[in-house]
Amino acid sequence: MLSKEIQLEVNKGAMLPLMEEFYTIQGEGFHTGTAAYFIRIGGCDVGCHWCDVKESWNAELHPPTSVDLIVNNAASSADTVVITGGEPLTWDMSLLTQELKNRNLKVHIETSGAYPLTGTWDWICLSPKKNKLPTQTVYDNAHELKVIIYNKHDFIFAEEQAELVNDKAILFLQPEWSKKEEMTPLIVDYVMNNPKWRVSLQTHKYLNIP
Ligand SMILES: C[S@@+](CC[C@H](N)C(=O)[O-])C[C@H]1O[C@@H](n2cnc3c(N)ncnc32)[C@H](O)[C@@H]1O
Ligand SMILES: Nc1nc2[nH]cc(C(=O)O)c2c(=O)[nH]1
Ligand code: SF4
Ligand SMILES: [Mg+2]
């Protein structure tokens, strides 16, 4: 249990449960191949059975960390910071994104969109999940839609989500990692037949980098 004082700071978004930070190459989606500093915030109740960071789910396992400290750490060679999780929109992202932008950093988010949008973002990657559908503010502001393909039904889900997202969003299909041998060839065929979609791979896993 957090003390009352810390709980208040977390509610304001002045402290956040920090899981890890690392400097790497964005492996997925539109910005694939570009250097970025990743900040992974704990806490997620969406419950994807194939989630590749289940250790992030329980926020209580990750120490409440002041936004000032998180932002100071983020000073690196990269000009871009990616906020991920867990589900970062569990928390109020306003202070964190404001302070990062004050340092002239570009601020990106990886989100399921399950909670309303907070924060000021240069790039929003929405990866919608069936168990907890995105909120309208995230559909309206997403720059990219990245749908994970675990089975054939997910192509239908992808088309439904493409109807709901704003029409400027760039559309990606990404194989679920454990099903990639089976699903990647289907994604390749699907994109050739439906070229409004692009292929996204988890390239960092092929490169053996974080
Ligand atoms: C771990 S999530 C954290 C951010 C947020 N909760 C979300 O789901 O967008 C980061 C990205 O990894 C994707 N992802 C998670 N597990 C995956 C897996 N097993 N295979 C492929 N992509 C995965 C998610 O869909 C999301 O786009
Ligand atoms: N290299 C790298 N790229 C990523 N893109 C999205 C990631 C995430 O977990 O949110 C991720 C990640 O964990 N590592
Ligand atoms: S929403 Fe993101 S962090 Fe949460 S379970 Fe799904 S993939 Fe994992
Ligand atoms: Mg990842």
Image (tube, rainbow, N blue to C red):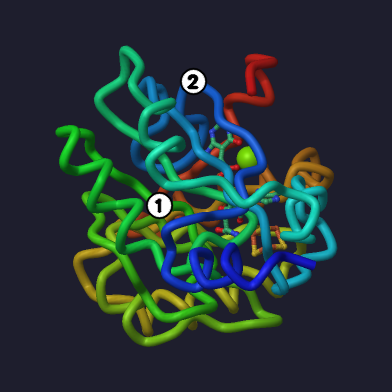
Instruction: From the top left corner, tell me how far across and down residue 183 is, in percent.
Output: 72, 49
Q: Nearer the viewer, residue 37 or 153?
A: 37
20 up-or-down from 184: above or below: above
Instruction: From the top left corner, tell me how far across and down residue 87 is, in percent.
Output: 58, 62
Question: Which residue is rendered at x = 31% and y = 12% of the image?
Answer: 77
* Residue underneath mark 2: 23
Q: Nearer the viewer, residue 7 or 158?
A: 7
27 up-or-down from 101: above or below: above
Instruction: From the top left corner, tell me how far across and down residue 7 is, in percent.
Output: 60, 69
- Please state the total of marks drawn on the protein image: 2
Helix, strand or loop status at disc 1: strand
Instruction: From the top left corner, tell me how far across and down residue 57 is, in percent.
Output: 76, 59
Question: Which residue is rendered at x = 26% and y = 71% of the image?
Answer: 141
Instruction: Say which label, 1 or 2, has the lower sequence index.
Output: 2
Whether residue 183 is visible: no
Residue type at mark 1? Ile
Q: Examine the image and state in which quarter residue 86 appears.
A: bottom right
Residue 109 is labelled as: 1
Q: Examine the image and state in which quarter residue 51 appears.
A: bottom right
Question: Which residue is rendered at x = 81% and y = 48% of the image?
Answer: 55
Q: Residues within 10 Å of mark 2 (few under 14, many from 20)?
A: some
Estimate the spatial distance between the alpha carbons at disc 1 and disc 2, rounded to whole Å.
Answer: 15 Å
Helix, strand or loop status at disc 2: strand
Whether residue 132 is visible: yes
Q: Quadrant of the N terminus?
A: bottom right
Q: Quadrant of the C terminus?
A: top right
Question: Which residue is rendered at x = 25% and y = 25% of the image?
Answer: 79
